[in-house]
Image (cartoon, rainbow, N blue to C red):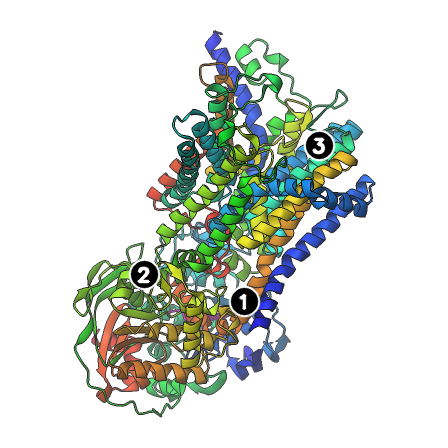
């Protein structure tokens, strides 16, 4: 056995990110570590790579117990990591990126010629062709990842961790990568791959370790399991505790047709997205995050300019209009990141709470904000939405995440718009806050308004939605209705399943 | 040799003498840019060097010790600035502004204490930087004028630029320095001590500023006056940016400022007012930067970084 | 409720008090090196700044342009547009005022009005120009404002020296305009003492700016835009409009400081009159010390002005040079700068737990495939790098 992690516990205050986790890895083996967001996979890998220190537990490599204090020591112990967000220097070329930190020298000088030869050599050895002199800027993601892999190989790593390696790749690039992984394993490298995507797990891994809420819930050989079983283990058995009352749906509120979006380099982010939301329904948008949901929401809300298509609310054109215009037209948004988009941590609660309201007569008149009214308004949100806060004048940064989120949800629901978009409304919040937020979303629907719920939390989508769109790589990969909804089917669609089947 | 070419030689000679103090500091600014530090305190560091060169000069009468004092004093100031910027995460502008106010005050304060004068200190006992003898060019008056009355330190500025070029782009240490400014997180993920590199770079930029400052007080003239740098550190800051933080680019941008100033000075004898001439280098900086950024943006470069 | 409020105010005060304290200690060391007794010197300083009516009024006179410049800097810096152009704005304002006051025909009230409005407009437009350079060419506001300070200084110098030079007095060969007529000058508040109407204007501006920043929707928009640009975009705030308005107001206010000096103390435009006194820099320091709070700027400007007038007093009567005040001032802001970490770290700690839960997904969303980690770093720290330029 090459690597053993025994009884790893990692606590952040009273939050247990890893609870007595055991992991083993053999030479030439591919181990998939799977689990939902927050299940503790990334924390475990950070411990292994020396970026975090475990609260307790040991790491044994080649029968020898070792301490990994930082990335340097991890690298020295033959552990390499291909990070999800590539750690590359844009203006350096391939060679410079690969040899970084272990540069061949000639005295104090950087021996670039030898570096190029070395890079060429390993690139041939592992059959990962790459021009050593090519610049990183403008390089497609797949090639960037190849640079990262070569970097790890250059460091002579025996254990290579891949953190969500396929999250940002195109299907062709994924195929290439999976081939590479198998090749590396055959050449004696041991691989840990962290992923959501069960199809990939099934096609490449020898063994799968499933994590949930910081614990290992299963450690199985791939030939002894199925994708369905793994997805079940990952999510856990969720019974829908709460029966959501029936509600007659009304006319179409939001109508999006053939929406296309490209990033600044011109590559496609959204392709021909067609969705609609009627009044009195909650429409879920499911998908592994990073498949265009964030950008879809930003487009709908005017924070990003789309290329083509149409967006309308009650037949009013909202395509590429300003945020102000769209808010006025009747859309409010609970943004997916509460500290980047949703609030300002240095601002007081009332300053954050009146965003989007401050120009209304409830708060201000003739351009003057009434502090008293603003505070009353905030206190009302605090009461109605159960925000645990001492006063409306403390800073948002002093609230816990769940309470900050409740404040934001309260603020947006109080906009009383016909359509509410909620993006990842319960990410990182505790169960109590989650229930409260769900109740408010349901209440909104019962009032006859429409809700577009974007979440990478499948259980949340299934619990709340009347109808679900599944997004995969910037496209709608399927639409499902409550009556015929099937968790596994969604999982398959989220992983690009149907598309693969069709191919 | 006709009058016109001699005139050119005079202008170019004064360009060199005006640009070298800026060049030293601009090289420091370029290095700081490379590690993602905006060091507005260069003005104060330059002033520090300018002052302590004269202090050591006054007490020892030794050129070497004067230069040493200039380098060490401004390095110390730069180190403090670096600690505040990097370790204490003080806002770079605020730290820089404070350093400038502080050093302007401290140098004037000490001038009065040590020399007992206000405004300016001049003395016949002060030695100036030795000048390179160009008598052997007597046969070529153009070149004799062009290279006349330059100190060794003037030449050294160009040498430093070339050394830094090789350092940045040819050595491992320079390679890592550049990486810190490009992506601090990535460099740290591979175990590079990015903050240490940043502080060291700021400190070294102080050393260069000290040399630039001593050129001001021991080069063309040998004296110290209150606020003798009068914004040269700021110009150097702009020169660092305009030269793409590349040592050789900085030579070009610094010579541009030197030329602007030199032409400004010679314009004082013409129809153009001397006051407008004094504004030229600063206005030229803005224009040049705008043009440079415009071309960068057109090329699609991301200037947000 | 009240207790929390009080606690907050006290914690806000703690840092500047600490910074001032440690700076006074450093100043004392400098005094000690000179060979004087720090306590005695500080005593003379205090007396020279606030010891009697004349000293107090002299300090307030000196504080007047500092307060106004501090306010001008505060509105821009608190919205994270960190220019250092106060000096140039003062110059433009003061120069325009003096030209109107000297050469405009018409009734006095009209001249005065034109002199003030002209100054406001000129300072505002001048300041907006840097903003335009930032938006159009992504030029660092710090660099452009710095360079423009010198352009303003020398261009007005040109006009003063060549067009509007006062040729009646040749003594000292000062580059200055003629004196403006007595009827256009700001009245003194106390007969025979230097304090003038400008101080009242400064105090009014303090309350006006406090009101605008804290009570109006515009102030709210500017504040939120300064706290978190993404959040304000999300709320539908037009950040371009905010930037230009804020820079205009900032420039206009600083220009008024120049106007006040021309109409209130010098009665003419003198080349270098603002630069040598460092009004704008000290005003910026006052804004930094008080964390951009207008009432705090009023107080800290008076303290800083007191340090200066007190410095003059010790320079008059002892061997300790005047610049001891600049040393103390520089130290104060240097130690104030470290403040940013204290509040920043606290927030970071609270966010830590969150971040772990969200680690995987948040980052992914922030960067996707094209972003670099630099972007995250930038967003996370919300630091001044915005203004740094490439």
Front residue of this view, candidates B252 and C378 = C378
Contact, CB < 8 Å: mark 2 with mark 1?
Answer: no
Dot 3: what SS? helix
Dot 2: what SS? loop
Cα distance in 3D space between marks 1 and 3: 45 Å
Chain containing mark 3: B
Instruction: Give residue B149's position: percent from left, percent from top.
Output: 62, 18
Other residues around mark 2 within 10 Å, as few (<14) / some (14–19) / many (≥20): some
Same chain? Circles 2 and 1 = no
Instruction: Give residue B88's position: percent from left, percent from top.
Output: 62, 56
Can I make out residue B197 in this image? no
Residue C234 is tagged as: none
Instruction: Report whether B73 appears left or right of A222.
Output: right
Front residue of this view, candidates C244 and A291 = C244
Screen quadrant of the C terminus of chain A: bottom left
Cα distance in 3D space between marks 2 and 1: 26 Å
Same chain? Circles 1 and 3 = no
Magenta region: which residues? A157-166
Which residue is identified by label 1?
C347
Front position among marks 3 and 2: 2
Front residue of this view, candidates C263 and A311 = C263
Front position among marks 1 and 3: 1
Other residues around mark 3 within 10 Å, as few (<14) / some (14–19) / many (≥20): many
Screen quadrant of the N terminus of chain A: bottom right
Which residue is identified by label 3?
B53
Image quadrant assignment for residue A145: bottom left
Contact, CB < 8 Å: mark 3 with mark 2?
Answer: no
């Amino acid at each position: 056995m090459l690597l053993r992690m025994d009884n790893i516990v990692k606590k952040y205050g009273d939050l247990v990110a890893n609870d007595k986790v055991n992991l083993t890895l053999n030479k030439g083996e591919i181990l998939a570590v799977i689990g939902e967001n927050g299940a503790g996979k990334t924390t475990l890998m950070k411990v292994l790579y020396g970026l975090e220190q475990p609260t307790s537990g040991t790491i044994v490599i080649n029968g020898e117990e070792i301490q990994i204090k930082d990335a340097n020591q991890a690298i020295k112990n033959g552990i390499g990591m291909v990070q999800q967000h590539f750690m590359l220097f844009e203006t350096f070329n391939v060679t410079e990126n690969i040899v970084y930190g272990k540069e061949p020298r000639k005295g104090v000088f950087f021996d670039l010629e030898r570096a190029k030869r070395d890079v060429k050599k390993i690139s041939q050895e592992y059959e990962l062709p790459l021009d050593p002199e090519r610049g990183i800027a403008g390089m497609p993601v797949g090639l960037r990842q190849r640079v990262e892999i070569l970097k790890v190989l250059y460091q002579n790593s025996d254990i290579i961790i891949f953190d969500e390696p396929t999250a940002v790749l195109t299907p062709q690039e994924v195929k290439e990568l999976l081939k590479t992984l198998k090749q590396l394993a055959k050449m004696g490298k041991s691989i840990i791959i962290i992923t959501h995507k069960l199809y990939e797990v099934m096609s490449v891994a020898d063994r799968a370790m499933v994590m949930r809420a910081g614990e290992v819930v299963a450690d199985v050989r791939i030939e002894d399991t199925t994708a369905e079983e793994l997805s079940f283990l990952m999510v856990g058995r969720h019974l829908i505790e709460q029966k959501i009352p029936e509600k007659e749906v009304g006319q179409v509120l939001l109508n999006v047709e053939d929406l296309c979006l490209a990033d600044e380099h011109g590559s496609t982010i959204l392709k021909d997205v067609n969705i609609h939301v009627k009044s009195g329904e909650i429409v879920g948008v499911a998908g592994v995050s990073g498949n265009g949901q964030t950008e879809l929401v930003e487009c709908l809300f005017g924070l990003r300019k789309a290329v083509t298509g149409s967006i309308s609310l009650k037949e009013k054109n909202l395509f590429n209009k300003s945020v102000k215009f769209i808010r006025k037209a009747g859309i409010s948004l609970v943004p997916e990141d509460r500290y980047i988009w949703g609030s300002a941590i240095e601002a007081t609660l009332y300053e954050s709470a009146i965003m989007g309201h401050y120009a209304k007569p409830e708060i201000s008149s003739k351009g003057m904000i009434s502090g008293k009214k603003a505070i009353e308004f905030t206190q009302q949100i605090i009461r109605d939405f159960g925000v645990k806060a001492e006063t409306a004048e403390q800073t948002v940064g002093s609230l816990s995440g769940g309470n900050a989120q409740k404040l934001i949800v309260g603020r947006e629901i109080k906009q009383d718009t016909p359509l509410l978009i909620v993006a990842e409304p319960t990410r990182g919040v505790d169960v109590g806050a989650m229930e409260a937020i769900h109740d408010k979303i349901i209440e909104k629907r019962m009032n006859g308004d429409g809700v577009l719920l974007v979440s990478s939390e499948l259980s949340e989508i299934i619990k709340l939605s009347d109808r679900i769109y599944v997004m995969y790589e910037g496209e709608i990969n399927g639409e499902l209705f409550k009556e015929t909804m099937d968790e596994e089917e969604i999982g398959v669609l989220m992983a690009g399943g149907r598309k693969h089947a069709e191919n | 040799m006709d009058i016109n070419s001699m005139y050119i030689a005079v202008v170019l000679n004064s360009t060199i003498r005006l640009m070298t103090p800026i060049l030293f500091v601009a090289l420091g600014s370029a290095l700081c840019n490379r590690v993602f530090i905006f060091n507005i305190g260069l003005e104060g560091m330059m002033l520090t060097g300018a002052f302590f060169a004269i202090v050591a000069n006054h007490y020892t009468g030794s050129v070497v010790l004067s230069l040493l004092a200039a380098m060490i004093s401004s390095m110390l100031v730069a180190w403090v600035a670096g600690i505040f910027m990097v370790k204490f995460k003080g806002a770079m502008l605020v730290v820089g502004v404070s350093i400038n106010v502080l050093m302007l005050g401290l140098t004037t304060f000490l001038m009065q204490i040590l020399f007992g004068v206000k405004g300016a200190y001049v003395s016949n006992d002060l030695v100036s930087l030795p000048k390179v003898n160009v008598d052997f060019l007597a046969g070529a008056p153009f070149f004799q004028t062009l290279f006349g009355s330059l100190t060794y330190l003037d030449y050294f500025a160009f040498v430093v630029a070339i050394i830094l070029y090789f350092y940045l782009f040819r050595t491992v240490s320079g390679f890592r320095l550049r990486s810190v400014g490009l992506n601090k997180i990535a460099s740290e993920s591979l175990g590079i001590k990015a903050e240490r590199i940043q502080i060291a770079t700021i400190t070294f930029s102080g050393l260069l500023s000290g040399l630039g400052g001593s050129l001001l007080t021991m080069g063309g003239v040998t004296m110290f006056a209150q606020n003798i740098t009068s914004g040269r550190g700021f110009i150097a800051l702009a020169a660092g940016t305009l030269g793409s933080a590349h040592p050789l680019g900085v030579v070009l941008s610094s010579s541009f400022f030197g030329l602007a100033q030199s032409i400004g000075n010679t314009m004082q004898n013409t129809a153009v007012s001397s006051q407008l001439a004094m504004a030229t280098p600063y206005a030229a900086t803005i224009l040049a930067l705008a043009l440079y950024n415009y071309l960068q943006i057109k090329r699609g470069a991301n200037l947000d970084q | 409720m009240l207790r929390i409020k009080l606690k907050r105010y006290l914690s806000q005060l703690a840092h500047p008090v600490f910074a001032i304290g440690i700076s006074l200690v450093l100043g004392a060391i400098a005094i000690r090196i000179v060979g004087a007794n720090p306590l005695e010197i500080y005593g003379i300083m205090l007396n020279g700044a606030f010891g009697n009516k004349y000293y107090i009024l002299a300090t307030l006179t000196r504080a007047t342009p500092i307060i106004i410049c501090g306010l001008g800097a505060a509105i821009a810096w608190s919205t994270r547009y960190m220019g250092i152009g106060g000096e140039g704005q003062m110059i433009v304002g003061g120069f325009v005022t003096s030209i109107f006051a000297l050469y405009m025909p018409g009734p006095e009230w009209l001249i005065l009005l034109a002199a003030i409005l002209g100054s406001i407009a000129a300072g505002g437009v001048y300041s907006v120009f840097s903003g335009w350079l930032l938006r159009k060419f992504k030029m660092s506001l710090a660099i452009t404002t710095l360079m423009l300070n010198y352009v303003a200084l020398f261009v007005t110098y040109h006009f003063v020296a060549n067009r509007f030079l006062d040729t009646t007095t040749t003594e000292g060969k000062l580059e200055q305009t003629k004196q403006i007529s007595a009827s256009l000058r700001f009245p003194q508040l106390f007969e025979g003492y230097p304090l003038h109407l400008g101080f009242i204007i400064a105090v009014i501006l303090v309350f006006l700016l406090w009101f605008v920043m804290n009570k109006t929707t515009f102030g709210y928009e500017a504040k939120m835009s300064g706290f978190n640009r993404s959040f304000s975009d999300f709320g539908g705030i037009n950040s371009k409009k905010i930037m230009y308005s804020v820079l205009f107001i900032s420039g206009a206010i600083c220009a008024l400081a120049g106007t006040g000096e021309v109409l209130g103390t010098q009665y003419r435009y003198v080349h270098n009159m603002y630069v040598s006194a460092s009004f704008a820099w000290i005003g910026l320091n006052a804004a930094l010390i008080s964390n951009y709070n207008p009432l705090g700027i009023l107080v800290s400007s008076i303290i800083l002005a007191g340090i200066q007038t007190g410095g003059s007093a010790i320079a008059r009567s002892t061997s300790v040079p005047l610049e001891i005040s600049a040393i103390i001032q520089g130290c104060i802001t240097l130690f104030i700068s470290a403040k940013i970490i204290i509040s920043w770290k606290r927030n970071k700690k609270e966010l830590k737990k969150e971040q772990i839960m969200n680690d995987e997904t948040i980052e992914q969303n922030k960067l996707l495939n094209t972003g670099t980690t630099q972007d995250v770093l930038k967003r996370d720290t919300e630091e001044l790098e915005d203004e740094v330029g490439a």
